[in-house]
Image (cartoon, helix red, strand yellow):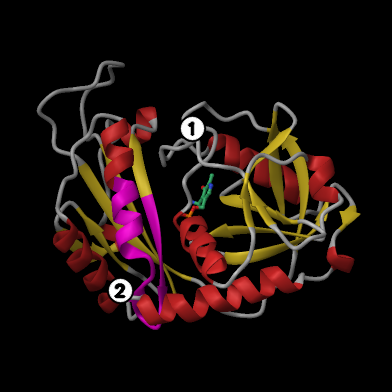
């Protein structure tokens, strides 16, 4: 089925959407993006995603091409035009089109692209089996750029080993999954996740899940943790807009929570979906 996508002001069939070979997103990964999940045809955590988009754009010296209301209208129209009930909206803003030059061009209009993806988000979850690898990404992981080759190589490498994903490690501590924030649950039941810094992306799902968990009395420790601590943990899980709360049941061959999704991750996923549905717009 052909989707209707958004490109620079127009809603058109995906086959008709094309951009210049000189787009800086293509040549320099000079673009930032957001992925917002859709439940019951509505946008989950929309304002969080737009706030992070504005921040990412600001960090790379690009303006916000439109305001919140215009982004919302664009997202909603794309969802309606594609009859999307459950899935996500991908949005990308590049600096625009200019002859290849390392210097940022002046007076170019940004390229704005958005499309939907159909996904089963709220269904039953099998746990992930992950392998650790060194984190080879750049040092500004707090900016959501389309520079995703390291993450893509890493996840493909994990698949080749028959696993589902990676947990990346830097200076002995876990940073992130290929496209997710990482957590462990201690034997005392505390949820441990790395604190925000330029080493990780400030996940929108992370913020929402931590808030919901705190409100329900879970103890949260925002600090780095090692791979050994993770392997000895009661449970582990990851969060992202396209996976919600996804249990991890194996790290480097060591089984966690008996090789099945743990109760904390399952409970947080239920809570997130419940609240996500309630607050979706
Ligand atoms: N870390 C990385 C590296 C990611 O790519 C993602 C997903 N975009 C996340 C964390 C999770 O962020 P969010 O909850 O906003 O999807």
1 or 2: mark nearer the eye: 1
Q: Is-magenta flag for residue 252?
A: no
Labels 1 & 2 near each other (Cβ < 8 A): no
Location of residue 1 with respect to 51 vertically, above or below: below
Label count reads 2
Indicate the quadrant containing the N terminus: top left, top right, bottom left or bottom right. bottom left
Q: Which mark is residue 79?
A: 2
Query: Which residue matches tag 1?
Result: 198
Q: Quadrant of residue 85?
A: bottom left
- Circle nearer the N terminus (1, 2): 2
Q: Give percent across and percent down for residue 10.
A: 16, 60
Q: Which residue is painted at 41% across and 37% down in the image?
A: 143
Q: Residue at x 70, y 44 (%)?
A: 167
Query: Disc 2 on helix, strand or loop?
Result: helix
Query: Residue 164: horizontal and vertical position, in percent?
Result: 73, 56
Q: Percent position (x, y) of residue 231?
A: 84, 49
Residue closer to the observer: 220 or 8 = 220
- Does residue 103 sit above or below 109 in this rendering? above
Q: Which mark is residue 250?
A: none
Q: Residue at x 55, y 77 (%)?
A: 271
Quarter of the view holding residue 186: bottom right
Picture coordinates of residue 217 (x, y %)? 60, 69
* Residue 194 position (above or below residue 125): above
Q: Magenta segment, which residues? A: 34-53
Residue 219 image-quadrant placement = bottom right
- Whether ligand 1 has any atom under 8 Å from the Cβ at mark 1 is answered as no
Q: Disc 1 and disc 2: Cα gap in Å? A: 32 Å
């Amino acid at each position: 089925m052909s989707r209707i996508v958004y490109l620079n002001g127009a809603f058109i069939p995906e086959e008709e959407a094309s951009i210049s070979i000189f787009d800086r997103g293509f040549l320099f990964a000079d673009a930032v993006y957001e992925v917002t999940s859709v439940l019951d045809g509505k946008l989950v955590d929309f304002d969080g995603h737009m706030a992070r988009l504005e921040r990412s754009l600001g960090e790379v010296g690009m303006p916000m091409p439109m305001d919140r209301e215009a982004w919302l209208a664009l997202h909603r129209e794309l969802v309606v035009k594609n009859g999307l009930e459950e899935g996500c909206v991908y949005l990308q803003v590049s600096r625009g089109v200019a002859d290849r030059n390392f210097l940022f061009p002046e007076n170019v209009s940004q390229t704005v692209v958005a499309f939907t993806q159909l996904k089963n988000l709220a269904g039953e979850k099998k746990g992930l089996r992950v392998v650790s690898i060194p984190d080879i990404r750049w040092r500004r992981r707090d900016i959501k750029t389309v520079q995703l080759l390291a993450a893509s190589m890493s996840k493909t490498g994990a698949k080749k080993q028959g696993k589902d994903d990676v947990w990346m490690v830097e200076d002995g501590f876990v940073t992130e999954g290929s496209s997710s924030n990482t957590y462990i649950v201690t034997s005392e039941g505390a949820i441990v996740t790395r604190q925000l810094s330029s080493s990780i992306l400030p996940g929108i799902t992370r913020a929402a899940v931590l808030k919901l968990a705190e409100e329900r009395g879970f103890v949260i420790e925002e600090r780095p943790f090692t791979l050994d601590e993770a392997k000895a943990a009661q449970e582990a899980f990851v969060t992202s807009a396209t996976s919600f709360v996804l249990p991890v049941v194996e790290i480097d061959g060591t089984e966690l929570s008996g090789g099945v999704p743990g109760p904390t991750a399952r409970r947080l996923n239920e809570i997130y979906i419940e609240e996500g549905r309630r607050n979706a717009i």
